[in-house]
Image (cartoon, rainbow, N blue to C red):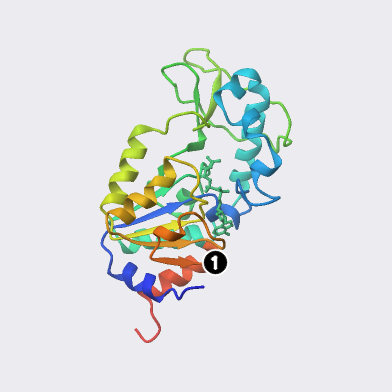
Amino acid sequence: MDSVLPAAEALGRARRVVVFTGAGISAESGVPTFRDDLTGLWARFDAERLATPEAFHADPDLVWGWYEWRRARAARARPNPGHLAVAAIEARVSGTVVVTQNVDDLHERAGSRAPVHLHGSLFAPRCVSAAAHPAASGEPDAEPGEGRRVPPPRCVHCGALVRPGVVWFGEALPEAALAEAVEAAAGCDVFLSVGTSGVVYPAAEIPRVAARAGAFVVQVNPAPTPLDPVCDVNLRGTAAQVLPQLVAAAWDPPGG
Ligand code: APR
């Protein structure tokens, strides 16, 4: 693994930092990623049948049940040292923006103030009407089985079906979130890309915006990704291992 020192020096001097995260940062909390061989969700489930508007229209009980299963798993997970290190960066650098593709709430539960959710949240269901009334995301079922059908609730305001508050394939990202992420990437000194395969657009363009704008770009990932060439440093390790080392080297270097 490249030494963390160049990244730590840049981070220690930075006034504006973007931490951009993907499913990999939650992997060590037991939340499955999408594209890891064998364990990734898309290796085990059919995204076409579970993660598109057409899928929900065709079989709302199957889709709602699957997301409730994912929500139950996320609710049971605990933030790991990677999430905590991100919150520590925010505490050290007031100009930090956390941008996540994840739909769990582990950044929030680790202490991150207001992560920008590019792909929505498992904990923000809404109705399918144009008004998109927010729906209460109560306690998930004890543990809906992976394939169990669970009828989605009805909106208390308009009676329409309630859907998961996530961005499905073929849907646009929330405009305000995307604009905030691009603006932060275009103006930061250091950009940390953590635990993303960098293959799903438009989110995957954000690290490239930072690189083009002259940020010092650091990637934390045990495996190579298409982002490697745009990074100044590629730290080959897991989020829970590398991020705490990076924070310690940036602000608590041995010998002061
Ligand atoms: N620490 C850091 N990175 C890890 C770890 C870990 N412990 N474990 C796995 N990774 C890396 C993998 O090597 C991979 O590059 O995390 C990445 C996970 O990639 P994906 O599973 O593709 O997840 P992500 O990049 O977040 O996917 C983007 O795709 O399906 C959509 O909406 C979904 O938001 C998701 C988007």
Q: Nearer the viewer, residue 91 or 186?
A: 186
Residue 53, percent from left and from top: 55, 24
Kindly identify the residue that appears in the image at 60 percent across and 35 percent down: 139
Ligand 1 is within 8 Å of the C-beta of the residue at disc 1: yes
Residue that carries the numbered disc 1 in the rendered image: 237
Residue 49, percent from left and from top: 65, 28
- At label 1, counting other C-alpha atoms closer than 10 Å, the crowd grade (few under 14, some 14-19, many 20 or more) is some
Residue 151 appears in the figure? no
Residue 10, percent from left and from top: 32, 69
Amino acid type, callout 1:
Gly
Q: Quadrant of residue 154?
A: top right
Kindly identify the residue that appears in the image at 60 percent across and 18 percent down: 57
- Looking at the rendered image, the quarter that the C terminus falls into is bottom left
Residue situated furthest top in the rendering: 158
Kindly identify the residue that appears in the image at 50 percent across and 46 percent down: 199
Q: Is residue 153 left or right of residue 131?
A: right
Counting labels gives: 1
As drawn, 121 above or below 31: above
Kindly identify the residue that appears in the image at 46 percent across and 25 percent down: 134
Residue 211 appears in the figure? yes
Residue 186, percent from left and from top: 28, 50
Q: Is residue 35 left or right of residue 158?
A: right
As drawn, 77 above or below 223: above
Q: Nearer the viewer, residue 200 or 251?
A: 200
As drawn, 17 above or below 57: below
Q: Nearer the viewer, residue 250 or 71?
A: 250
Question: What element does badge 1 sit on?
Answer: loop
